Amino acid sequence: MRKYFVDKNGRYGSFGGQYIPELLMRPMQELEAAFKDILKDKKFQKNFNFILKTYAGRPTPLTEVKRFVQAIGGKARVFLKREDLLHTGAHKINNALGQCLLARETGKKRIVAETGAGQHGVATATACAYLGLDCVVYMGSIDMKRQAPNVLKMKLLGAKVVGVYTGSKTLKDAINEAFRDYAENYESTHYCLGSALGPHPYPEMVRFFQSMIGEETKKQSLKLFEKNPDAIIACVGGGSNAIGIFSPFIEAKKVRLIGVEAGGRSDKIGEHAARFHGGNPGVLHGCHSYLLQDENGQVAPTHSVSAGLDYPSVGPLHAKLFEQGRAVYSSVKDEEAVEALKLLSSTEGIIPALESSHAVAYLMKEIKNFKKNDCIVVNLSGRGDKDLPQLFENNLLNGGGKE
Amino acid sequence: MNRIGKIFKQGPAFVGYITAGHRGLDYSIEAALALIEGGVNILEVGVPFSDPIADGPVIQNASNHSLRIGINIFDVLELIKKIRCRTETPIVLFSYFNPILQVDKKGIYRLAKECGVDGILVVDLPLEESELHIKKCKDNSIAPIFIIAPSTKTERIKLIDNSGRGFLYYACRSGTTGMRHFLPSGFARKMKNIKKETHLPVVAGFGISTKEDAEEVIKHADGFVVGSFFVNAIENGAAPEELKELAKKIDPRLQTID
Ligand SMILES: Cc1ncc(COP(=O)(O)O)c(C=O)c1O
């Protein structure tokens, strides 16, 4: 299988790159070299796989959801890739363990991370506790409120959580602060970026550390229904769970790849985070990709009910797949995602994260367009416990999934 | 000879930074002219950006202020044009890449030249991403100005020196912009090494807020840069006259008698 998707200039077609201050060039070059080393390092990979298996809980199962499909009036077979069953409750632990192991290998003792939904923060805090590293997590103050359970978890895990009160006080601003910390401390510190975005080598490295999702899916699909999935659906924040499950299938052209962005409240700029619908190419956080912005290149505010999708840019490989037409990107609204969360909970006993609920909601809308023998895999990137207090407070849980 | 070249013929340069539109465009004109009267002989004018990852709280705050009153890069160039009407001091446009990229198709480099810009420094555009930028600068007789950092290796310093024009800016610390109290240890040694590898003049800064530091810098570099110190004063409501006095006070090139 293909190892690299990025070219030697750190790009995916015209997307990606390293738009960073000169100060960070050397740390990025060193990180790239360390990443290339571990790609060849059998011992590292064996250790990583061992930890994924015995600590994180891999492989995760594919679960068929017949009652859910019946409830939405579908004919196709639908399977969930159960990343929600992983330790800490989302796919983020794959990448956090990979990067923290890499950091330890390169002698870094301190880890900084940003977090939106808090899942990457919790995953990083967990990896740091497990590997004996210091951990600082930057989190927008709005996200600290709406993902309060995760803030408590991070603290319990021994991480320092630093609230970010600048800009939109969400994921984007947490990334700004993490970069600033890293610029000051790069000699002792690794920046554990939580999604497949940012300057090269992050998009490629995070893709690599998430690609077992797709590799397992491939094997499990052959076992369960004797072919590749006909379609794979994943939510797209920065794009790590989606690229993790997509990337082993990119060359299998018959597999439809569908990314689902946050449609938020409306199509108006500032009220959603659908980069492929309201955005155009631009540079944010070191990376050339689709970006929600105004005509003067100022980054636009975003909104999503789900903190993990509430980000104005998107991973550069997704931008390439979008332009090539290899993957399609759709979006669903806040309320559709909440409905999906409720319905999956009541029909299957699986409470999905609000992020993952976007992928489920897409399926609910589009199920009519899938045929009887189609086998669809939805990446259930995480579980919804973290979202319940917020949904409860805002009175969004009334009524349950079935009317 | 171009404006930048002339300055370095005269002795050590005093580079001063302001964020365009911080406390209003009218104020920015007065502030720029006051700094120049106070001794600044290369003016850096910052384009505000929503996500200034290389900046500390002082310049972030200035940038936010300016964005809140709706300043865009065209306003900044208009401002520069007005300053240019009143001075021959070289002006460097200081920006993040995205505000330039998005208006590139409107001929922003040519417009910059017409408004009197002498150099452009793009904070988040390292050499590897600069090919087109350098070409557009050169096509319009604008100097592409590059930064050297403490992490920059010797080989790379040479490459940057070859690609840049006008001068190089040694941002002498890790971290973000902001006022600090001491120069980093090993400054002199690092600066000597940079001078050995470069043919362009090298100014140094990043945190200078005292005359002592500025004095130490120009022992080894071809100029010193003062940014957050001025921006902070502007934020605190300094009148143009006070900015002029601050510039004088920090300038080690002046022989004071008292
Ligand atoms: C459960 C879950 N899914 C998805 C995401 C979105 O990130 P990405 O697009 O990188 O997978 C997050 C981010 O916090 C998350 O917590």
Image (cartoon, coloured by chain):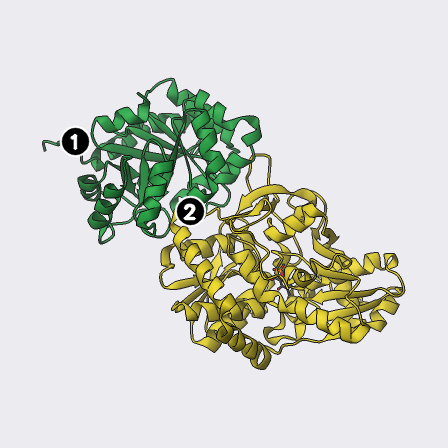
Residue type, numbered disc 2: Pro
Q: Please name the residue shown 71% across and 50% down the image.
A: A265
Q: Which residue is mark 1?
A: B254
Q: Circle 1 marks a residue in which chain?
A: B
Secondary structure beneath label 2: loop
Q: Please name the residue shown 32% across and 40% down the image.
A: B169
Q: Pick the quarter of the image with the N terminus of chain A.
A: bottom right
Alpha-carbon neighbours of circle 2 within 10 Å: few (<14), some, or many (≥20)? many
Position of residue B165 relative to residue A192, above or below, is above
Q: Are marks 1 and 2 in contact (CB under 8 Å)?
A: no
Q: Does the rendering let one see residue B228?
A: no
Q: Which chain is in green here?
A: B
**Which quarter of the rendered image does ligand 1 occupy?**
bottom right
Alpha-carbon neighbours of circle 1 within 10 Å: few (<14), some, or many (≥20)? few
Q: Which residue is mark 2?
A: A21
Position of residue A47 relative to residue A161, above or below, is below
Q: Colour of chain A?
A: yellow
Residue type, numbered disc 1: Leu
Secondary structure beneath label 1: loop
Q: Please name the residue shown 21% across and 42% down the image.
A: B217
Q: Circle 2 marks a residue in which chain?
A: A
